[in-house]
Amino acid sequence: MRFSTLSFQEDAIARENLRPTIPAGCEPWYAELVSACWHANPEARIDSLPQSWAVLSGAADPARARTALEAADRNLVREAERLVLLFTPPFEHSKPHPGYIMGYPPGIRENGGQYTHGSLWMAAAWARLGEGARAVRLLNLMNPIERCRDMESVDRYRGEPYVAAADVYSAPGREGQCGWTWYTGSASWMYRIWIEDILGFQLRGNRLAIRPAVPPEWTKFTILYRAGSATYRISVEQAEMLPSLVGALAEPVVEVDGKRIDGDSFELALDGRTHDVRVRIPPRPGQFKELMSAVHTSEAAPARTPAESLR
């Protein structure tokens, strides 16, 4: 939330976490340039697109790409308002003028709101890093159904629960209110990330790969897929997350009709038969510790009423 008595520029300066730390290994000339830009213009200090695409493109150093994505998650995700912002702070007085985007009021549409089409790429980036729980957390925040679980949420969101919104506002007094809905760009990316990046169902031509990135509590799931005249029953299971077994399954194991294959992809046979595919995926390193932490936190939390559980 903004400091209500401050402008967006003053607010950004007051909230020091909106000014990411310049890495110690950064070249001096570059660090000086970044610092000068921040002092000259406090708006749009961190944008999710370059951080997400540092991962999605595969072009950045993996360690630095993860650092960038952590910064985006820390500064752009607002749990209480169910927002995944495109960038922050919004443009309001920037010079030189950044163009049409500043024609929107601060916190509306692309100008510092949740522009869902682009915000979804942060979820995809977490999934590509194998962080299924963090990816699903963002997808659930942006899921229109989850924004309409009770009347208070419905009154805030003011959109249909069954279609994707192009944007959701972060403007003061409008936090969490949707813009226009039935937006195919947002809907198609949301669908694709859930199917391809989370469930890992990746079909390219006639070749199918199963590469899930799911939360630790998703121990198993099943996909029934019709490929022409053939049917594929795909069962995916996570290896048991016991400390003694964490290293036992280093790579996914895929079996097609009872026979283990090399790798995680195979050609579809359009032969009118029903085929059984079994996929066993290893727990992500550190996942056991995270799951146990979540269990202990849940046990320590006070009981909630059914109404509170809906929120």
Image (spheres, helix red, strand yellow):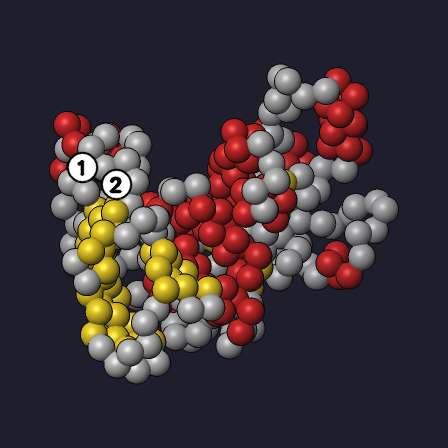
Q: Is residue 63 above or below residue 123?
A: above
Report the residue marked by disc 1.
Answer: 241
Residue type, numbered disc 2: Pro
Taking the spot 59% from the left edge, 51% from the top edge, the residue there is 86
Q: Quadrant of residue 259?
A: bottom left
Q: Is residue 55 left or right of residue 299?
A: right
Q: Nearer the viewer, residue 59 or 114?
A: 59
Q: Is residue 197 above or below residue 48?
A: below
Q: Is residue 2 left or right of residue 135?
A: right
Kindly tell me whether residue 264 is visible in this rendering: yes
Element assignment for label 2: loop
The spot of residue 294 in percent (x, y) is 22, 37
Foreground mark, 1 or 2, reads: 2
Q: Quadrant of residue 134?
A: top left
Q: Nearer the viewer, residue 263 or 224?
A: 263
Report the residue marked by disc 2.
Answer: 282
The C terminus: image quadrant: bottom left
The spot of residue 27 in percent (x, y) is 72, 20
Q: Count of labels shown?
A: 2
Q: Quadrant of residue 289?
A: top left
